[in-house]
Image (cartoon, helix red, strand yellow):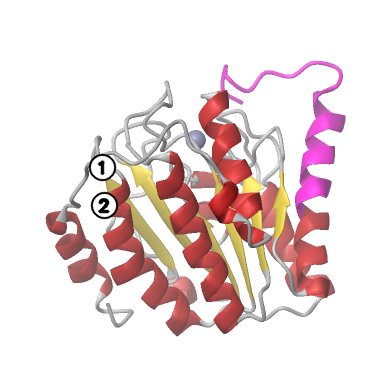
């Protein structure tokens, strides 16, 4: 356990509530064939089989994926992690597992220091781990290109039966802990791309789970914009932290494609 992940007498029970909340949302989404949003704390994506860290105790999203497979007989589950930090726990849990595709966009060079582009999974799981590290400063444009040319095509080829999203809002340009530059409407646009993809490939089964995000106003307006958009009222969303100029970085994209083209048509 690292110093950020301390615990007191209530920590265990609170962490169980977060894990149970994520699982409940994912199973509800499966049964109803509708999107679900789970506002969880503590987050989970830094917790592995036998370790925790980075404010995470139980891996909420990994537990949900396992439960979908055990209790709903889901064959293929995709986890898309857009928290600014690499979800090392989720990554490690599914590294050898071809039935759970893990795709992570994250800032390179910050905590926890894992998730290089070259790490693609082991054994039968080779190709089913997709790490997309970005250098500081990249925002809406680079993310848009990465989603359109890499993330969405890979998801279409994998054909998940449900999509789970590790939704950290710490890749936002207002976030004090990191330095990627997504805007609030930029976030919502990416998330709605995933929702529309879920409508096409997995009967609308998609679950968004809160991970990190340390600027509360930015966090709030991204979740408000997402929820309004999910119920068809996206035009009512107002954003204080709107788009900033970012034309996108094709060099990143070229590297992603070169690494991943052995496994996917990208
Ligand atoms: Zn984070």
Residue 227 placed where, x, y %?
65, 51
Q: In which quarter of the image is the N terminus?
A: top right
Q: Is mark 1 on a helix, strand or loop?
A: loop
Residue 93 placed where, x, y %?
58, 56
Residue 141, numbered label: 2
- In this orientation, does residue 159 appear? yes
Name the residue located 44 percent from the left edge and 46 percent from the top edge. Answer: 185
Q: Residues within 10 Å of mark 2 (few under 14, many from 20)?
A: many
Residue 251 placed where, x, y %?
12, 56
Name the residue located 32 percent from the left edge and 36 percent from the top edge. Answer: 180
Q: Distance between the residues labelled 1 and 2?
A: 8 Å
Where is residue 117, by image quadrant? bottom left
Q: Residue furthest front?
A: 236
State whether residue 255 is above or below residue 263. above
Q: Do the residues labelled 1 and 2 touch (CB within 8 Å)?
A: yes
Name the residue located 51 percent from the left edge and 24 percent from the top edge. Answer: 215
Q: How crowded is mark 1: few (under 14 residues within 10 Å), some or many (20 or more)?
A: many
Residue 159 placed where, x, y %?
53, 83
Residue corresponding to mark 1: 138
- In this orientation, does residue 100 appear? no
């Amino acid at each position: 356990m690292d110093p950020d992940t301390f615990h007191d007498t209530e920590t265990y029970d609170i962490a169980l509530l977060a894990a149970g909340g994520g699982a409940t949302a994912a199973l509800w989404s499966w049964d109803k064939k509708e999107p679900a949003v789970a506002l969880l704390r503590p987050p989970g994506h830094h917790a592995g089989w036998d370790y925790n860290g980075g404010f995470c105790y139980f891996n909420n999203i990994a537990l949900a994926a396992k439960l979908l497979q055990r209790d709903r007989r889901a064959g293929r589950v995709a986890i898309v992690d857009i928290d600014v930090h690499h979800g090392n726990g989720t990554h490690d849990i599914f590294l050898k597992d071809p039935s759970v595709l893990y795709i992570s966009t994250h800032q390179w060079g910050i905590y926890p220091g894992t998730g290089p582009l070259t790490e693609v999974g082991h054994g039968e799981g080779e190709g089913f781990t997709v790490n997309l590290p970005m250098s500081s400063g990249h925002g809406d444009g680079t993310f848009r290109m990465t989603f359109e040319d890499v993330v969405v095509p890979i998801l279409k080829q994998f054909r998940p039966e449900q999509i789970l999203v590790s939704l950290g809002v710490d890749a936002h340009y207002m976030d004090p802990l990191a330095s990627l530059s997504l805007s609030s409407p930029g976030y919502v646009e990416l998330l709605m791309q995933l929702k529309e993809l879920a409508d096409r490939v997995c009967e609308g089964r998609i679950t968004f789970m809160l991970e990190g995000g340390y600027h509360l106003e930015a966090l709030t307006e991204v979740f408000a914009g997402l929820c309004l958009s999910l119920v068809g009222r996206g035009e009512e969303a107002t954003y204080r932290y709107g788009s900033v100029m970012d034309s996108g970085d094709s060099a990143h994209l070229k590297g992603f494609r070169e690494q991943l083209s052995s496994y996917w048509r990208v």
